[in-house]
Image: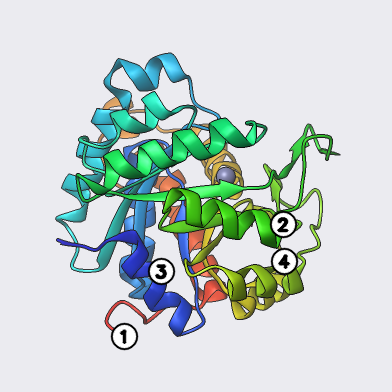
Amino acid sequence: MTLVALPELLEHARERRFAVGYFEAWDLYSLEAVLAAAEAEESPLILGIGGLSANHGWLRSHGIEIYGAACEALARRTNLPTAILFNEADSFEEAAAGLRAGYNAVMMHTQGWPWERLVADTKALVHAAHGLGVAVEGEVGALSEMRDGVLDDSGGRMTGVGEAVAFVEATGVDCLAVAVGNVHFVHDDHTPTIDTQRIRDIGAAVSVPLVLHGGSGTPADQMRAAIEAGIAKVNVGTRLKRVYGAALDAAVRAGGSDANLLHGSRRADDVCVRAAEAVTSEVRRMIRVFGSNGRAAA
Ligand SMILES: [Zn+2]
């Protein structure tokens, strides 16, 4: 196991103009699928789960700890430089539950919060996290979202350079997620337009690495341009769940006669293993788009 602080992982990527994908998992099979892809591509790795679509009651009933422990155990399987992220907690309290649970980075989903709460809660989280050797990803601005195939930009707001500078200085976050035309929950149903000049302007004004959420739907050419402009981490979730769902449907339809082999066996017949293999292929493809392949050691 080579646990690496997230800021260190991203600083390394920024200097070399590639991005590390945060391929958000949702269960053990998907966590292992992401790990397998990073191993195959010799890429730095960010393992983790997130709260954006999750049942928060479940997360707080030790779900946060269960997956933190799982990520830590999985990290022991690999010598890749690895960070472990609890992404998009819904509050300070929920993020704080991740601080002693195996993650070495946490993030709150703060879109729509008033500035005072955003700064106060993020600053408090940074203080608590840094005391335990955990990094914090902060966020300024708000992403538009896809809802049932329709773009909802009512809550979207681009990140301003001035507010990014003020936020990083006031809170001490280790990396910054920005809204630059990227969209949450998008896959192939909408093509976002990324404002690369805005990325350059924010990157020149703040010292910390920049993060692009909503990476599922951004075409490869725009993604390369965003990374060239200074994005060091890209979040991908929606696309992987769609790939997994389609492969799982096919595996269930193809079926088999032995339920013990089909479900939970971890053998080739296991429908979730077959679905996870599809996720691994997709993650490998995206790792190559982000340019982190072959970068585990250099
Ligand atoms: Zn996100």
Q: Is residue 76 left or right of residue 139?
A: left
Which of the pair 170/142 is nearer the observer?
Answer: 170
Across and down, in percent, residue 159 comes to 70, 54
**Secondary structure type for disc 2:** loop
Q: CA distance from mark 3 to mark 1?
A: 13 Å
Tell me the number on the disc at residue 156: none
Instruction: Specify whether residue 100 is in view.
Output: yes
Q: CA distance from mark 2 to mark 4?
A: 24 Å
For disc 2, does the CB lie below 8 Å from ligand 1?
A: no
Which of the pair 284/175 is nearer the observer?
Answer: 175
Give yes or no for contact between labels 1 and 2 (Cβ–Cβ under 8 Å): no
For disc 1, does the CB lie below 8 Å from ligand 1?
A: no
- Of callouts 2 and 4, which one flags the residue occurring earlier in the amino acid sequence? 2
**Secondary structure type for disc 3:** helix
- Of callouts 1 and 4, which one flags the residue occurring earlier in the amino acid sequence? 4
- Of callouts 3 and 1, which one flags the residue occurring earlier in the amino acid sequence? 3
Assign ligand 1 to one image quadrant: top right
Q: Amino acid at mark 4?
A: Pro
- Of callouts 3 and 2, which one flags the residue occurring earlier in the amino acid sequence? 3
Across and down, in percent, residue 40 comes to 34, 71
Residue at mark 4 = 219
Tell me the number on the disc at residue 10: 3
Residue at mark 1 = 298
Q: Amino acid at mark 2?
A: Gly
Across and down, in percent, residue 248 comes to 51, 38
- Of callouts 4 and 3, which one flags the residue occurring earlier in the amino acid sequence? 3
Pick the quarter of the image with the N terminus. bottom left
- Of callouts 1 and 2, which one flags the residue occurring earlier in the amino acid sequence? 2
Give yes or no for contact between labels 3 and 2 (Cβ–Cβ under 8 Å): no
